[in-house]
Amino acid sequence: MDPHPQLLESLRRAKHVVVLTGAGVSAESGLATFRDKQSGLWEKFDALELATPAAFAKDPPLVWGWYEWRRAAVLRAQPNGAHKAIADMANAVPRLTLVTQNVDDLHERAGSPSVLHLHGQLAHPYCEHCRRGYEFRSAEMSNLPQEGYRMEPPRCESCGGRVRPGVVWFGEPLPAAEWHAALGAAEAADVFFCVGTSSTVQPAASLTDIAIEAGALTVQINPNATEVDAKVAFAYRAPAGEMLPQIVRRAWSKG
Ligand code: OAD
């Protein structure tokens, strides 16, 4: 699919580009999304049993094991063309703010050093009591579980409290600094990309509306229809790993 000339021109002139990503940006790296039919995690698993503070309180080994299984999948995955194209775009424009709902580190591994993780990170668990960060030991890294594995969460080295996954669960607030930075970026964006997200989870999804209201040129990249299609200037029904490299190549002959 050819990127529209107006988009390419706006990108070349843009002072501030904002990219909001969701699970779809990592789909071509082999990581499951949440809501895709058949392959989505929330099609197979019950979010209420795995992704809430109450779920962790009720059955810590179930929840910890599930997140360790997902962390194992991320460790085995490699960044794809979409992650790399965003890193290339950051080198081509004066300013790029990358906001992700993803808990993996594939943006960082593709060369994006500064990523606003609205929903936390699998690699950064912390003590549920004193909130001190927990460092995985190398033994834990090489002994990663399979799907369905139950695993006792480690204990905090400082206070002995239970360590919890470093992700934002349903019912929890977003990290305030990341959220405010994302909000400010959406309000200041010249071009705003919404990539690989179903735009169903708030408040992250509202960033696209905020960018539209603030006058940004908005673009969605998603092989499937979403409610955002009707709102954005350009909606590309294409995989991010194909469309984003093409946009960067055509705008700046890169990648
Ligand atoms: P979803 O699973 O809700 O949406 C993923 C989107 O990616 C869908 O709209 C797909 O059509 C699209 N998609 C699939 N393959 C793609 C590809 N190759 N290129 C581009 N798009 C593709 O995931 P999110 O919107 O990220 O929250 O979900 C938001 C939040 O809900 C997640 O951060 C997670 C979940 O519960 C927490 O973990 C707190």
Image (cartoon, rainbow, N blue to C red):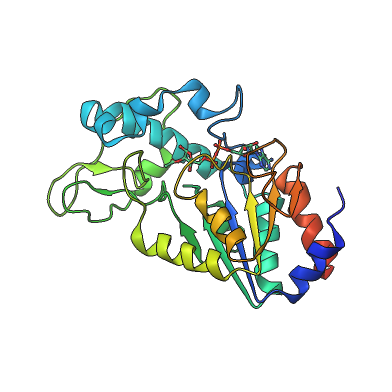
Q: Is residue 231 above or below residue 67?
A: below
Is residue 255 shown to the viewer in this render? no
Against 156, is 224 above or below? above
Question: Is 43 placed left or right of 226 in the picture?
Answer: left
Residue 175 position in % (x across, y down)? 35, 56
Q: Quadrant of residue 161 in the image?
A: top left
The answer to whether 153 appears left or right of 36 in the picture is left
Q: Residue at x 81, y 56 (%)?
A: 246
Which residue appears at 44% of the width and 53% of the height? 118
Question: Looking at the rendering, in which quadrant would you find the C terminus?
Answer: bottom right
Residue 126 appears at what percent x and percent y?
27, 50
Q: Which residue lies at the image location 54% right of the left edge and 64% below the top edge?
A: 186
The residue lying toward the viewer, choosing from 129 and 11, is: 11
Is any atom of residue 166 visible in this view? yes
Q: Residue furthest left?
A: 159
Q: Can you give x and y, in whole percent of width and height, for residue 51 in the image?
A: 36, 34
Give the quadrant of ligand 1: top right
Q: Position of residue 188 (x, y in %)?
A: 56, 71
Residue under the point 77% across and 62% down:
248
**Considering depth in this image, is 44 or 134 the residue closer to the camera?**
44
